[in-house]
Amino acid sequence: MLWRTEQTYRMWARRFAEFIRPRSPFAAGGEEVADFLTAMAVEFRASPATQRQALNALVFFLQEGLRREVGELDFRRSAARKRVPTVLSRAECTRLFEAITGSNRLMAETMYGAGLRLMELLRLRVHHLDFERRQLKVYSGKGDKDRLTILPDSVIPRLKEQLAQAKAWFEADRAAGLPGVWVPEGLERKWPQAGTDWQWQWVFPSRELAADPASGVKRRHHVLDGTFQNAVRAAAVKAQIDKRVTPHVLRHSFATHLLEAGTDIRTVQDLLGHESVETTQIYTHVMQKPGLGVRSPLDMGRVES
């Protein structure tokens, strides 16, 4: 599994162990898991997505880790709550980008211009960029799904400059005999030298080397998520945007602006990688002119009596 998934699963295992204390997880079964999931819904008001994540982690923990059968689970499901996404106007996006410096601006514009999730942006590799076809390939996105999305023309020259910088670091790393970048385990088994091949390098590599959290090997990783998140938040303050701005807001803005421009919702669904069009429909609630451009009656002028 990906390192972030391992971290998440360990976190849920620890929380479950604390919940059933003083009983040991080795003595736990489906009933204890169901009690924990019910408490998440009733006491902690967890979202359905968080509850599903905990369910997957604990079933994996008990069945694969402790070799205990969980069986049928009867628990209280978290209530689905509709959340209206935060969306920036086009002018606010421009102000935000102007307030970001260096490669962080290119990352922000690429994330917005292609509708990427945060980790999809950070995990971009050289072969994911197709300059000739103006396409960006997302591999192993949410749900381990692949998709194609837009590669904005306006970022292509700067992406080529970014790759030139990344290649300089790549060649220096090869000259120094450093290990290659991390690649999926299946690929590493089939092609052990893949991490030292140029096409598998990160588009946005970190300036500093760091120890791989899983293997301990010191190598070059991609830019840390926290570093980019902090840059976006600081830029929002500098741009005087009075909204809660995170990198994911750029993805929300991408979808909303496409719908406002008349793009078919099924096309937006494909570009975002949503399983269901119902997920994409949430952006119709925050469009500048929802309802296909219907005007408010207040803006239609007064009617003489």
Image: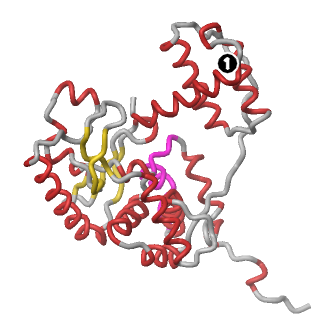
Which residue is located at x 15 percent, y 42 percent?
Answer: 178
Residue 133 in percent (x, y) is at 22, 58
Q: Residue furthest bottom?
A: 304
Which residue is located at x 24 percent, y 43 percent?
Answer: 219
Left or right: residue 23 compared with residue 151: right
Residue 191 in percent (x, y) is at 15, 30
154 over 196 or under it: above or below: below
In the rendered image, which quarter contains the N terminus?
Answer: top left
Residue 49 in percent (x, y) is at 61, 37
Quarter residue 287 falls in? bottom right
Dot 1 alpha-carbon crowd within 10 angstroms: few under 14, some 14 to 19, many 20 or more: many
Left or right: residue 99 compared with residue 296: left
Q: In this figure, which residue is indicated by the disc labeled 1?
A: 33
Q: How is the image coloured?
A: secondary structure
Q: Is residue 294 magenta?
A: no
Say what secondary structure mark 1 lies in: helix
Q: Residue furthest right?
A: 305
Quarter residue 181 falls in? top left
Quarter residue 54 falls in? top right
Which residue is located at x 73 percent, y 29 percent?
Answer: 77
184 over 81 or under it: above or below: above
Amino acid carrying label 1: it is Val
Residue 24 in percent (x, y) is at 64, 12
| Residue range highlighted in magenta | 262-275
Q: Is residue 274 magenta?
A: yes
In the rendered image, which quarter contains the C terminus?
Answer: bottom right
Choose between 296 and 151: the one closer to the eye.
151
Left or right: residue 272 compared with residue 164: right
